[in-house]
């Protein structure tokens, strides 16, 4: 990851959401797919990975969703729940085989073959210790809307640095109000999940956080942009700080 002074962006950066759920395939989300895409467009995102719980979007479904977008590029993905309640994102997954991967060796092996970025999602949320296999992942989420405690974020950052893993910011969106608070920006555009992985592993990205008043985790999940708070409405398209 490249460090920058507050407010100094990469030239021509690509704003990316790596962790988002919709109500269509994740029962814990309240976001209709159309509203998620509209929110991503309104927030200035250039790329959005859909990471449903243990479910993939097919290529044809992604193509249909892409027709709804004005600027954001839609990419598939999945959040796989392993038996010990560790959650791992696979950014780019669209084949149904990913819905059947239940062991760490199968998960990381398939992702490696396909060239997809693997991310330990919201670590230390339920346990103070991560299994040894988490070191096989490419990256660790260090800040999301579901990192409600400062010590969770601190532990995630320390783990990532000890294991020499990429540190990522993401929404972990289950409501529209989760978005546009934590995200990352790559130093250049990408056309495939494989290109995105290469940018992250090369450190060609920066994490961003927007100042906001909402407590974490969020007390409610907003399903419509019309129900966003005034603070979130005013933040649309606002230049962020590091």
Image: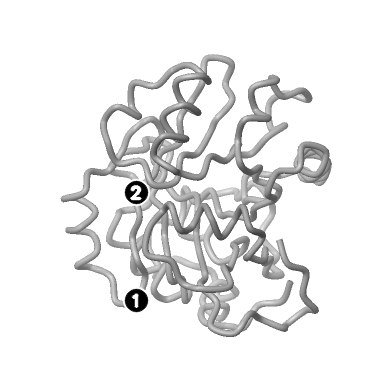
The reply, left or right, for residue 41 in relation to residue 230 is: left
Q: Which residue has dot 1 on it?
A: 71
- Reply above or below: 31 against 2: above
**Residue at left 40%, top 39%?**
78
**Residue at left 69%, top 54%?**
215
Q: Which residue has dot 2 on it?
A: 76
Question: At numbered mark 2, what does the secondary structure look like: helix, strand or loop?
Answer: strand
Instruction: Please state which of residues 130 and 107 is positioned toward the viewer in this rendering.
Output: 107
Instruction: Please state which of residues 95 and 26 is positioned toward the viewer in this rendering.
Output: 95
Q: Position of residue 204 (x, y in %)?
A: 63, 65
Q: Position of residue 239 (x, y in %)?
A: 62, 83
- Quadrant into which the N terminus falls: bottom right
- Quadrant into which the C terminus falls: bottom right
Query: Marks 2/1: CA distance?
Result: 16 Å
Give the numbered dot on residue 95.
Answer: none
- Identify the mark nearer the N-term, 2 or 1: 1
Question: At numbered mark 1, what does the secondary structure look like: helix, strand or loop?
Answer: loop
Instruction: Please state which of residues 156 and 178 is positioned toward the viewer in this rendering.
Output: 156
């Amino acid at each position: 990851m490249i460090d920058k002074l507050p407010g100094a962006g990469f030239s021509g950066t690509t704003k990316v959401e790596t962790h988002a759920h919709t109500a269509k395939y994740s029962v814990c989300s309240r976001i209709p797919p159309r509203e998620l895409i509209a929110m991503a467009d309104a927030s200035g995102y250039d790329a959005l990975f859909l990471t449903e719980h243990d479910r993939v979007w097919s290529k044809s479904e992604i193509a249909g969703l892409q027709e709804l977008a004005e600027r954001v590029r839609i990419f598939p993905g999945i959040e796989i729940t392993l038996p010990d309640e560790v959650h791992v994102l696979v950014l780019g997954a669209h084949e149904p085989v990913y819905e059947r991967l239940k062991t760490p060796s199968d998960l990381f092996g398939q992702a490696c073959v396909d060239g997809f970025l693997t991310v330990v999602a919201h670590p230390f949320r339920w346990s103070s210790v991560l299994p040894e296999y988490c070191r096989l992942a490419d990256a660790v989420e260090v800040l999301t809307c579901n990192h409600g405690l400062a010590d969770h974020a601190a532990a995630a950052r320390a783990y990532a640095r000890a294991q020499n893993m990429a540190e990522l910011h993401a929404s972990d969106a289950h409501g529209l109000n989760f978005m546009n608070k934590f995200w990352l920006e790559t130093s250049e555009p990408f056309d495939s999940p494989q290109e995105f992985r290469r940018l992250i592993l090369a450190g060609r990205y920066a994490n961003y956080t927007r100042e906001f008043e909402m407590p974490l985790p969020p007390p409610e999940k907003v399903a419509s942009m019309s129900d966003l708070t005034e603070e979130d409405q005013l933040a649309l398209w606002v230049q962020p700080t590091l």
